[in-house]
Amino acid sequence: MHAITIPEPGGPERLVWDEVPDPVPGEGEVLIDVAASAVNRADILQRQGFYDPPPGASRYPGLECSGRIAALGPGVSGWAVGDEVCALLSGGGYAEKVAVPAGQVLPVPKGVDLKQAAALPEVTCTVWSNVFMIAHLRPGETLLVHGGSSGIGTMAIQLARAVGAKVAVTAGTREKLERCAELGAEVLINYREQDFVEEIRRATDGAGADVILDNMGAKYLDRNVRALAVNGRLAIIGMQGGTKGELNIGALLNKRAAISATSLRARPLGEKAAIVAAVREHVWPLIADGHVRPVIDQEVPMSDAATAHRLVEESRHIGKVLLVTS
């Protein structure tokens, strides 16, 4: 088979479409003939040499895929060769074939075609686990999503609206904010021109956001705490704004607020399987009913993954950029 390899860390030009050995499904795994994968920020960090795969995972980038099951490993039940699926991966999605634990596999939801399904596993699992399983967003509460036009952001908007929450977003252009509004965001904040702390307070009559989904990390830490409502919950899922920030514990105590920080890739298999099962139970029906849909900017041939990486690094996309095998 062919896969994207990274002989040396560096820029997008370091991504090489190369012939490599086929993976073999182990105990409890299925082998998928990949139709598509999607670009995530973690893939860019891996390419740059800053985010190695966890032990035992494929060395090729790619945290999600869609395709058809080609083979079943020992001990697998509930799946059959030929099933159309998508999957959450620890790596290996930028390839023509990938082996993945059966507990991280999902059926392609009704109303979504096979390639489009590649845009779903990482964003649905990230949003559902952080916003709902950890931060417990409830109907009537306000969710603030940083990077509202990203793959994570576009999914967070839709899921929050589907459960009856109010959504505020930050983005850097009018076009991106307009797309967020089309998906259901009610409070639109241009972070280049507006202070999101002031804007979220204005939109909530001074209360603040009940839950904040943050991809920036250190750069936004202090302002995120100030933007939280009493009993608010800050869920940090990225470090695009740095890793070290100063936290005002007094402000956190006064608001009786909580901060969580998670990543999916290195979680134990059991935790990933539990998240995937929750997504199948709660999110897949919303997709089948048409309340939630993947937002896809464009498709790029997987062999030209460098072009897709440039698009994402330059933030010229809205939603997800797919890598397709054919």
Image (cartoon, rainbow, N blue to C red):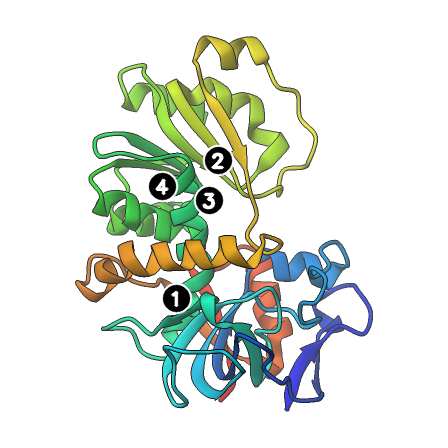
Q: Is residue 326 rendered to the left or right of residue 245?
A: left
Discs 4/3, front: 4
In percent of width and height, residue 250 lies at 55, 8
Task: Name the amino acid type tagged 3.
Answer: Gly
Q: Residue 170: in sight, yes or no?
A: no
The furthest residue to the front:
75
Looking at the image, is mark 3 or mark 2 nearer the viewer? 2
Residue found 46% across the figure and 44% down from its top = 147
Q: Which residue is mark 3?
A: 147
Residue beneath disc 1: 296
Check whether the beta carbons of the residues at disc 2 and disc 1 lie within 8 A of each other.
no
- Whichever of callouts 2 and 1 sits on the residue coming sooner in the sequence is 2
Give the residue number, with chain letter if any, for mark 4. Answer: 132
Q: Nearer the viewer, residue 99 or 96?
A: 99
Secondary structure under the numbered disc 1 in the rendered image: strand
Bin the neighbour count of mark 2 within 10 Å (Cα to Cα): few under 14, some 14-19, many 20 and up.
Answer: many
- Tell me whether circle 4 and circle 2 mark residues in contact (CB < 8 Å): no
In this view, the mark in front (2 or 1): 2
Q: Marks 3 and 1, Cα distance to the nearest angstrom?
A: 15 Å
Upstream in sequence: badge 4 or badge 3: 4
